[in-house]
Image (cartoon, coloured by chain):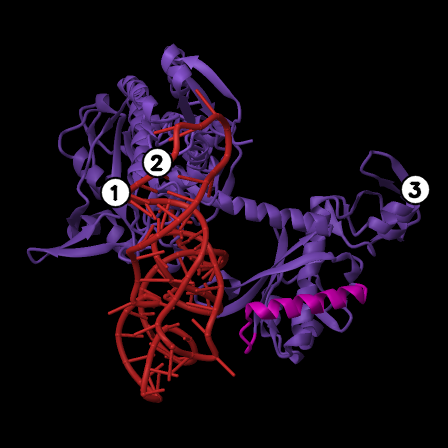
Chain colours: A purple, B red
Amino acid sequence: MIKVTLKDGSVREAAPGTTISELAASISQGLARAAIAAKVNGKVKDLSYSLTEDASVEILTLDNEEGLEVMRHSASHLLAQAVKNLFPGTILGIGPAIANGFYYDFDSGHTFIPEDLEKIESEMKRLSKQEYPFQYQEISRKDALAYFQNKQEKYKVELINDLPEDARISMYTQGDFTDLCAGPHVPSTKFIKAFKLQSIAGAYWRGSEKNKMLQRIYGLAFAKSSDLEDYIFKLEEAKRRDHRKLGLDLDLFSLHDEGPGFPFFHPKGMVLRNTLEDFWRKEHQKRGYVEIKTPIILNQGLWEQSGHWDHYKENMYFTVIDDQRYCVKPMNCPGGMIMYRTKLRSYRDLPIRCGELGLVHRHELSGALHGLLRVRNFTQDDAHIFMLPSQIKEEIIGVINLVDYFYHVFGFEYHVELSTRPEKSMGSDADWEMATNALKEALDAKGMDYKINSGDGAFYGPKIDFHLKDCLGRTWQCGTIQLDFQMPEKFDLTYVGEDGEKHRPVMIHRVVYGSIERFIALLTEHYAGAFPLWLAPVQVRILPISDRHNAYAGKVQTLLKEQDIRIETDDRREKINYKIREVQTEKIPFALVVGDKEAEEGTVAVRRYGQQNTNTLKLQDFIDLMQEEIKSKKVIFEG
RNA sequence: GCCGUUAUAGCUCAGUAGGUAGAGCGUAUCCUUGGUAAGGAUAAGGUCACCGGUUCAAUCCCGGUUAACGGCUCCA
């Protein structure tokens, strides 16, 4: 007998060769019905898997994330089976499970159109009801190649050829459909019930633009249809937060055909920008930063010297001035280099923390543009820190703390990635290793969780990236810290050391917001447009009940304006209900209703955004409340 | 850049099986002076994205361009 340790810690004896489904049945009938796979010693296996030795086993159902993932993967096979039935001759790519669903890539002479999705979905439903078991089969490399070559599945053949020598090769069959697959899968197609095909998209084979573009069909899949409906509802709700919609509704910014990717900021959007910049300046001054401004256009020679010409040319814009070739800056660093060289630096001057809110232009691919999240010109809240090698770790930690402080103020949750050397890069392996290790050490010293993003560093150095989520859960890089040994070398930066000799400083490039534009987009989605008081473009709107209260409203407005409150008055001849409705739809934090009673008593009837109740306050009390809330940068989320 | 979809008033969208367009919201003017989410009337507002083609006639059909949207690639 073998010993099987279950999730609850209990131990059961079983005969060698007992399958997972037999084990599940021995635990309970219900579990046997719900079981779809199991984690055996941490690895997910089919129900048909036989236990041959002592093991810890966790039965997976559609109630666990891992169980769902198995089902979603099986759903992709079901999709492929349906497509093969309806569109014979379609060649298969790959079909994994993804968050909330699955996709499958197809190479087909037929171009899939949205109407096809309904047909395919019906076919999937039909196949699901057939309750085809997913049958596992191990196969030799030779037989696998022969099988898929015979079926003209060239992508599968390529995959098999790329498998390591000692790899086990397996196939799964449901009905008349067989796919190369490591598994595991649900026991039968009947477990795939709550799904919906979502969209069609192009996707390069193996993610490389050098390869053919296949047609990808995305689908959603959940344990039950109510979960699916909930998710679809949530997606719709999330779209209400979309910064592109809110940006229009709240009159923050606009984009036009005349300048794709070059956003126009409206007066209210400018308030956000300026408030973010004011906060940024204040916090940086506290931390020993100075601020500079370098030109947007600089001659081509500079960019050749910096390495951008060799490594970043495709993303740059160019111009000619008096027959000389110039570049529009895609980054601020070369300007910073020139600034550093304007005088002799002593080791006593270091670190120099030199900030710049710099407008950069980058030629992003047209298909990549996305509201304010991906634009062609944006303002980086940049800084270059020039330092002694001995100051590296401390400076990096200082920046990590700064980023963490900022994101905390806004109530953002973030995750961190460490991006390592890309293919197209400059410098020696030793420098790269040193730089990468320095970043790692700083992260470890802070005890931060991070994931390694291999080959995603800048061309001049590795980086720590801080990622924030948009309304649909897509993540965007905002803050970044990049350690650079190359730029100081290229520009022959020096400082005079204690020994009186010249030495090479080390440099950090870093941003906190990342780009003001992207950060505003994420803030808009984060707050669903209801900005905290300190950021709100309009903080207070006064709503006089009727004309005869305009004078008092004017008095209140003047008083609040003196306190630097962003305030306006709606003195149109509209009913108070109408004005209240507007102030709510515009998500203005405070509405002050003033009528006879208020004018007489010197009070205001305060209605806060999102709340129904009102609070009558003495004017001074309201001012105090505002100032306290602005000062604390309090975040109040919509319920 | 690549694949797919889309483009009608400031916004959200109808519409014409080819005969130059309509609603709601918003805007303007007038009436209404109203106490916490939409009072009423009237009016203005569109080369139906742009350039070609087919046709007696194109917003509609065809081709191209541009932009937006969903992805891929890329990235702050």
Rendered location of residue A487, percent (x, y): 26, 42
Q: Is residue A176 above or below residue B12?
A: below
Numbered circle sitting on residue A13: 3
Q: What is the x, y in percent for residue A365?
A: 35, 58
| Residue identified by numbered label 1 | A359
Between tags 2 and 1, which lies in front? 1
- Amino acid tagged 1: Leu
Q: Do the residues labelled 2 and 3 touch (CB within 8 Å)?
A: no
- Write the residue at 60% across / 74% down: A91
**Nearest to N terminus: mark 2 or mark 1:** 1
Identify residue type, mark 3.
Glu
Question: What span is colored magenta in the figure?
Answer: A108-133
Q: Callout 2: helix, strand or loop? A: strand
Q: Which residue corresponds to mark 2?
A: A511
- Quarter assignment of residue B18: bottom left
Residue type, numbered disc 2: Val
Which tag is nearer the camera, tag 2 or tag 3? 2
Q: Which of marks 2 and 3 is nearer the N terminus?
A: 3
Give me the chain letter of mark 2.
Answer: A
Q: Where is residue A209 in the image (x, y as percent from the top left)?
A: 44, 64
Tell which of A442 and A433 is nearer to you.
Answer: A442
A74 or A55, nearer to the observer: A74
